[in-house]
Image (cartoon, rainbow, N blue to C red):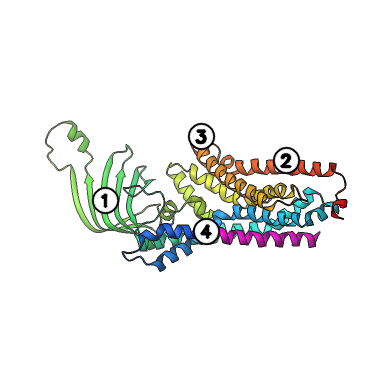
Amino acid sequence: MRIARRYLASEIYRNTALVLIALLGLFSFFALIDELDRLGDGLSIWNLFYLELLELPTRLYDLLPIGLLVGAVLGLAGLAQRNELVILRVSGVSGLQLLAMLWMSTVPLMVGAFVLSEHLTPMAELRHNEARLELLGRAGGGRLSSGYWFKENTPNDGTRIINIHTVQTGGQVQQVTVLELNKQRQLERRLRAPLGKFHADGLTLQDVVVMTIQPHAEAALANAQAPAEPLVTRNVLPEVDIATSLTSHRLTARIVTPERMAIPDLWDYIQYLDANQLQNDRQMVALWRKFAYPFSLLVMITIAAPISFLQTRRGGVGSKVFVGILLGVGFFMANQMALNIGTLSKWPPWLTALGPNCIALALALIALITIERQFRRRPSTIGALT
């Protein structure tokens, strides 16, 4: 059994590696072609190659489940075409035992997927966004035309709203606007600065224009009379320090796709959103999907098993690979639909993240059990090999 398991694992690893190399090359080529119109204005072809190189771990993260499904179907179908699966079956190895061997072969891939998800992909994604900021002057993420918006509570039970127009590397920001509101949600102060920098204790703004609204401004305006004193005072300060819970890491978390963040960083951002009464459903679903990501590889190998065991004596590798590709694309679309529908319908995060995986796993197991029963009802297959 150990020799058979190693042989199955080697076939799956080899074919999965070939499929992933082909998919990575294809997607990278089309992405590079799409970015060619950005050449010029200080951006060279080597810069584009560098950006694509930084995006490889993220692309591998997205393609690994589909690559494993197609690679496993290709490897197992090849074994079936050479009657090697038949030999295993007639020697007393059941379909469920074969599935257990496939699951054990998937464990190293799950460990590698966890390392990819928690270390390589977040680092590459952060460096990719920094490189895009340096080369293109912008990065991806949830940016509006007016920039990035954040809200937090202040120690005096007020509210602070921070608008950052441009994010730079090293925690530096440009065109920062800070609005400070009191308990009654009335504007007390507005700060505008062309430059700012995040540090361990908060945010430091430079060349700040401070507009302070007097407490009696609302009453004075309600009287419709000219006030004796100015309602708004304007000061220009060379530097202002703001003690804010927003950090450079949390600012980056707004730019990076939640599924591509490391679990500790994602959890820290969720706590920040929760502490400031901000919506964190999308991030909670992403957290559950991070835990479900290695499990999805088990689902893929389970889906591949019944496809490969069908018609073991007649082969049909091409049709099986085609079915595997269709199922992989369908599973990816189901995951995305579950994410969108679950977020809009307020489903529990665990259901949104694990629902498609559990359904696909149940259907694959039902199909495998059905094929196993049909195999046991057939006449002896040994004669077919002589």
Please report the bounds of the magenta region as a residue range.
1-24
Label 3 or label 4, whichever lies nearer to me, is: 4
Label 3 or label 1, whichever lies nearer to me, is: 3
Q: Which residue is mark 3?
A: 345
Residue occupying image coordinates x 32% and y 38%: 185
Identify which amino acid the numbered label 2 is placed on.
Ile
Task: Pick whichever of labels 4 and 2 is earlier in the sequence.
Answer: 4
Q: Is residue 340 left or right of residue 171?
A: right
Q: Main secondary structure of the magenta part?
A: helix
Residue 191's disc is: 1
Quarter of the image with the N terminus in it: bottom right
Residue occupying image coordinates x 12% and y 39%: 228
Identify which amino acid the numbered label 3 is placed on.
Ser
Q: Please say if the residues under marks 2 and 1 sit with CB atoms less than 8 Å apart.
A: no
Identify the element where label 3 is drawn: helix
Estimate the x, y position of residue 75 in percent, counting from the top left: 69, 57
Whole-angstrom CA distance, mark 2 to mark 3, is 29 Å
Is residue 91 found inside the magenta-colored segment of the image? no
Estimate the x, y position of residue 74 in percent, counting from the top left: 67, 55
Q: Which residue is mark 2?
A: 366
Identify the element where label 4 is drawn: helix
Residue occupying image coordinates x 14% and y 42%: 229
Dividing the picture into quadrants, the one containing residue 24 is bottom right
Q: Which residue is mark 4?
A: 26
The reply to whether residue 198 is visible in this rendering is no
Task: Pick whichever of labels 2 and 3 is earlier in the sequence.
Answer: 3
Identify the element where label 1 is drawn: strand
